[in-house]
Amino acid sequence: MVFNLLNKKYMKNFTKLLSFLLVTAFVFNGCRNPAYEVNVLFDAQVITYKAGLQLTDANGGTLPGNIDVTVTGTDAGSIYDFSGTKKIYAPNGVITLGVHPKEIPTASKTLSFNVIVKIPGYEEKNIPMTIAVNQFSQEIKGITMVKTAVPTPYTSVVVKDFPLGTGGATTTISSFSTPSTAGVPQTTSIAIPAGTTFRDANGTLLTGGALTAQAINFDAGDPELVSLFPGGDLSAPNVIGKDGTVGEAFFSPAGFTDITMYVGGVEVKKFSTPINVSIQVDPTFKLDGSTTPVKAGDVLSVYSYQVSTGQFKYETEVAAIVDGGGKLAIPFTTDHLTKFIVGQVFSKKACKIVQVTFIAPWLGANSTVVSIEILTLDGTKRLDYTKSQVLFDGTKVDFKNLPPFAVSYIVRQGTTAIAAGNITNPCDGTALSVTLPNPATPVDLVTLLLNVKCPQGQITVPRFDLYYKAVGTPDSQYTLLGTVINGSIKTTLLKVGTSYDFRAYWGNTIKTVGNRPITTADMSTTVGENDFLGTKSPQYNKSLLIEACKGI
């Protein structure tokens, strides 16, 4: 209750303070005021455990503003927006979650929850997440959102209407298939027998003038597969295996598709007669342990996925055939509609998490941001990908989504690989240390810090995520700089003498400041209403500061 009251009291004032911070903070030079008799506007230490998601449109477009985000699952009650509200925000597709300070994970209790993302016109996402004890690392996970009726570089789409006869039954064999495109050369074909009727989730018979059928086929060989896959990871916690038990498993997809149908605007869930489905497979797919691509006769598993529950379920096993188009395919029948995945699935019930410590003494107290890519040993297939990971010297990161077979990893800063290696047995939980070498080109260790001085005392700025990009580049280039803690961020990613655009996210507040130069390595200052507040809008900046001070 105290936590919620604290938020209600200070939320409005922080929005003003954040505006003031971004407008003024990066134009001052000076020394940090060591005085720290602070009255807190919003407790900067309230949320220490966090997790982030970055939603992007598969075609590179701008996501609409009406993004609905909810948290479900076992520990949903412990999860808040990073700003401290129970409502979860997604400004520009950025979702930042925090754990209630009285419900943090312990050595015997890892928090588990699901993030449900709904955007009109896009496929719904159900993303399982966990936060373990001492998991303080700042990570942004990329999730690619796909429009249901628009093809992308990674998907092909077909939508077709079929007339229905008396009693809502098909009158002839109704067949359709996704197109073969440059981005997705493989197809999914569906054939509905004549006389088939359709029922909704409650088992009610559906009747109407026509059946609208749709299929989205995904390119299983594309590196973006990880962010496109149901749940946003190839590793999933809620899988009903061939033996009927539920547990964690890792998917190695050779193909997958999403099939939906509607009668009179009501979604079809069941058929009176099983329909025929044939999914062409990625020709470069290799069975575990094989050095050659999949061939006719190789047996692959078929799994279904329900987004509402986030659960995968074993359906059948099928030997690959050469279809009428001369391509390898997995044919099967089904009496229900959902996403279908074909490939190999590996149980992870006995696996332990690998914790990786990053060693980089050259960072000092500064941070840097890297991407982490997990690949097959031969480097031909991406198995996991972290878009933005904030690292300090000694940061510990849990590699939670590894398969139970040997993998390789690459750590990159921008497009440059700075560390690489193999993990021979990802299932045994053996700790790993990765050393980030001293950069060949010296980096600037830049500090951005703002203390805000009010008549009643100083304000400590709450934690918020700060993004940056080079001046003149498109907004799609905004990259995580890190989390501002107590008004401060120390980083190796900015260069003295260069100007940047900055963007901050806190709750549903987005503040952008363009063309701010980094004039010195120490961009620290303490400001009050009687101090110099810039040349562009000093009176406006002063009004923001006065309003922020009213809240303490």
Image (spheres, rainbow, N blue to C red):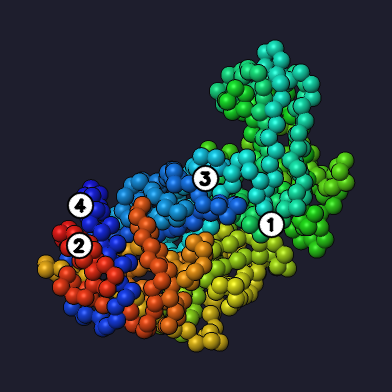
Q: CA distance from mark 3 to mark 2?
A: 43 Å
> Foreground residue, 149 or 32?
149
Label 4, on which residue? Answer: 9
Q: Earlier in the sequence, mark 1 or mark 3?
A: 3
Disc on the earlier residue, 4 or 2 = 4
Q: Which mark is residue 126?
A: 3
Q: Is residue 177 above or below residue 483?
A: above
Q: Residues within 10 Å of mark 4 (few under 14, many from 20)?
A: some
What's the CA distance linking mark 2 and mark 1? 51 Å
Q: Is residue 238 above or below residue 510?
A: above
Quick one: label 2 or label 1, which is nearer the N terminus?
1
Q: Amino acid at mark 4?
A: Lys
- Discs 2, 1 touching: Cβ within 8 Å: no
- Badge nearest the viewer, 4 or 2: 2
* Image point (54%, 80%), residue name: 435
Q: Residue at x 33, y 79 (%)?
A: 523
Residue 429: which quarter of the image? bottom right
